[in-house]
Image (spheres, helix red, strand yellow):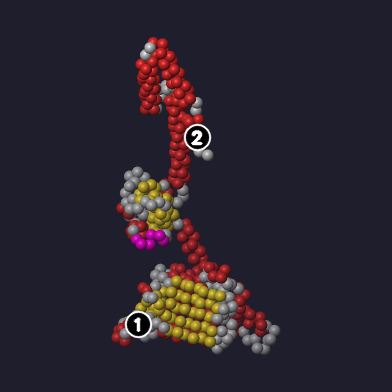
């Protein structure tokens, strides 16, 4: 059912119509009595029209004169219209006041956020900023409004990121403009068609804590290294052949000290990877790398597995030979350790669509899907007892992930419990080096400090 408006429901129209009819009847009667009925009706109608026009004018004055309220027109229909409009106006005013208060509250909340927030236009002009943003970026609220942000900031890292292709990725660990000891992280979020939100966070404390943690792990590992070497050395010297009672104890102590030494070595490797700035880029000859890995796989397997190596690309890698060897070797020894005797291990190096891949697949125990997202975390193991039995430290895949990250490579893991696993390191085109010609190789070998691989 259609809702009728209050105006249509009101009796004012009936009253107005009744008045008009009464006027017409009175005019007609008077006209008949005076012998000029038509003139009397015409005069009455003209009077009524003039009176209505007068009331409309009063309504108009009242509407235009809202600031200095003049009396409301008191004629029926028009006074109802005026009353209705006044009511609407008051409701609108109240709503407006509420909205302004709400906006004010949001602004105050945004102003006092601990993180810096800036509203930027599509062309990166500053529209609005909160207190923390002004403090962290050294900008002025009113003086800098409307100006391009890159012109306000003396921070080349931030400005090139703002105009670069990787703006969807947050910018981490950049010095604050004018205050290099404060480290910032920035994230740009599109929030309407024309505006962007730039969130700036002070991550100095977080980075300091992270550094304290790294230093602590590195120092502890370093301090443990010497005593462990001594203990391990003495344990190796103990003769147990003539003392069968202590033989199993010494054997267990040797096993545990080897494990601890391996954990310390892996922790030190991770600390070095954390601390090292850039990768020491050099040509890493993949053919000899694969031969070396094959030898390592054979020595861990001790002939219990079928091991094959496929070198389907003659490309080499650009990167750190030591780091890459450590990552690949971890993948290969894991494949051997987590594959029961009689299983198969394939090590492959191939090129596909401009990217090169190092791939290790096995027919081993496999990894249940729920463990895959966390498998590269430090000390994360699927089965702690199996890892210990196989001499694992829980740090191997962390090292792999770290090394690959430093080489802009990706680690893909596919696995099915009971069927096997495949670990693939995918390297970007910029890490790929075409095979050297004989002349290139002899030139490289002739350079001081370069030995033939
Ligand atoms: P660990 O020293 O324990 O082997 P890693 O970081 O190298 O530590 O590996 C983490 C865990 O991932 C291992 O404990 C093991 O459960 C699982 N894992 C790694 N590689 C394989 C594989 N090829 N097959 C099955 N499980 C694997």
Q: Residue furthest top?
A: 34
281 horizontally vs 328: left or right: left
Location of residue 150 with respect to 338 vertically, above or below: above
Q: Is residue 269 magenta?
A: no
Q: Which residues are magenta?
A: 164-169
Location of residue 52 with respect to 166 vertically, above or below: above
Label 1 environment density (alpha carbons within 10 Å; few <14, some 14–19, many ≥20): some
240 horizontally vs 11: left or right: right
Q: Is residue 453 visible?
A: yes
63 horizontally vs 295: left or right: left
Label of residue 4 in the image: 2
Q: Where is residue 371 drawn, in percent x and y?
A: 56, 69
Q: Earlier in the sequence, mark 2 or mark 1?
A: 2
Label of residue 435 in the image: 1
**Label 1: which secondary element:** loop
In which image quadrant can residue 27 be found? top left
Q: Where is residue 334 drawn, in percent x and y?
A: 53, 78
* Of the pair 70 and 374, the residue shown nearer to us: 70
Residue at 31 percent across and 85 percent down: it is 437
Q: Is residue 168 magenta?
A: yes
Q: Where is residue 175 drawn, in percent x and y?
A: 39, 58
How many callouts does the rendering have?
2
Task: Please identify the quadrant where the C terminus is shown.
Answer: bottom left
SS assignment for the magenta stretch, majority: loop
* Of the pair 139 and 363, the residue shown nearer to us: 363
Q: Residue furthest right?
A: 245
Residue at 49 percent across and 62 percent down: it is 210
Label of residue 243 in the image: none
Location of residue 158 with respect to 421 vertically, above or below: above
Contact flag, marks 2 and 1 (Cβ < 8 Å): no
Residue at 49 percent across and 66 percent down: it is 215
């Amino acid at each position: 059912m259609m809702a009728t408006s209050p105006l249509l429901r009101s009796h004012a129209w009936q009253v107005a119509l009744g008045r008009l009819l009464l006027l017409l009847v009175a005019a007609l009667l008077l006209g008949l009595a005076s012998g000029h009925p038509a003139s009397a009706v015409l005069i009455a109608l003209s009077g009524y029209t003039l009176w209505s026009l007068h009331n409309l004018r009063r309504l108009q004055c009242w509407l235009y004169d809202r600031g200095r309220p003049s009396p409301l027109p008191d004629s029926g229909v028009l006074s109802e219209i005026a009353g209705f409009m006044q009511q609407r106006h008051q409701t609108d005013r109240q709503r407006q006041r509420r909205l302004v208060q709400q906006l004010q509250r949001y602004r105050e909340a945004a102003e006092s956020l601990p993180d810096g927030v800036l509203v930027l236009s599509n062309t990166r002009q500053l529209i609005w900023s909160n207190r923390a943003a002004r403090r962290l970026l050294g900008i002025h609220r009113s003086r800098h409004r409307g100006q391009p942000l890159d012109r306000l900031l003396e921070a080349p890292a931030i400005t090139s990121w703002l105009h670069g292709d990787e703006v969807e990725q947050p910018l981490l660990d950049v010095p604050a403009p004018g205050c290099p000891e404060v480290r910032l992280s920035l994230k740009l979020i599109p929030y309407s068609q024309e505006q962007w939100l730039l969130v700036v966070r002070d991550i100095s404390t977080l980075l300091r804590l992270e550094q304290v943690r790294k230093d602590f792990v590195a120092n502890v590992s370093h301090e443990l290294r010497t005593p462990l070497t001594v203990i391990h050395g003495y344990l190796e010297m103990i003769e147990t052949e003539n003392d069968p009672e202590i033989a199993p104890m010494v054997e267990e102590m040797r096993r545990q000290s080897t494990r601890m030494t391996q954990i310390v070595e892996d922790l030190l490797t991770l600390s070095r990877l954390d601390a090292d700035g850039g990768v020491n880029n050099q040509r890493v000859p993949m053919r000899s790398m694969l031969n070396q890995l094959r030898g390592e796989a054979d020595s861990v397997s001790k002939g219990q597995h079928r091991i094959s190596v496929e070198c389907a690309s003659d490309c080499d890698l650009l990167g750190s030979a030591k780091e890459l060897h450590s990552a690949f070797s971890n993948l290969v020894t894991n494949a051997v350790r987590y594959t029961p005797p009689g299983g198969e291990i394939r090590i492959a190096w191939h090129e596909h669509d401009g990217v090169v891949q190092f791939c290790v697949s096995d027919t081993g125990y496999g990894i249940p899907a729920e463990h895959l997202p966390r498998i590269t975390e430090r000390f994360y193991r699927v089965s702690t007892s199996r890892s210990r039995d196989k001499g694992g430290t829980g740090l191997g895949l962390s090292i792999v992930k770290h090394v690959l990250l430093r080489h802009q490579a990706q680690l893909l893991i596919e696995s099915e419990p009971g069927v096997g696993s495949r670990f693939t390191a995918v390297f970007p085109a910029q890490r790929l080096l075409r095979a050297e010609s004989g002349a290139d190789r002899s030139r490289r070998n002739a350079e001081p400090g370069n030995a033939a691989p």
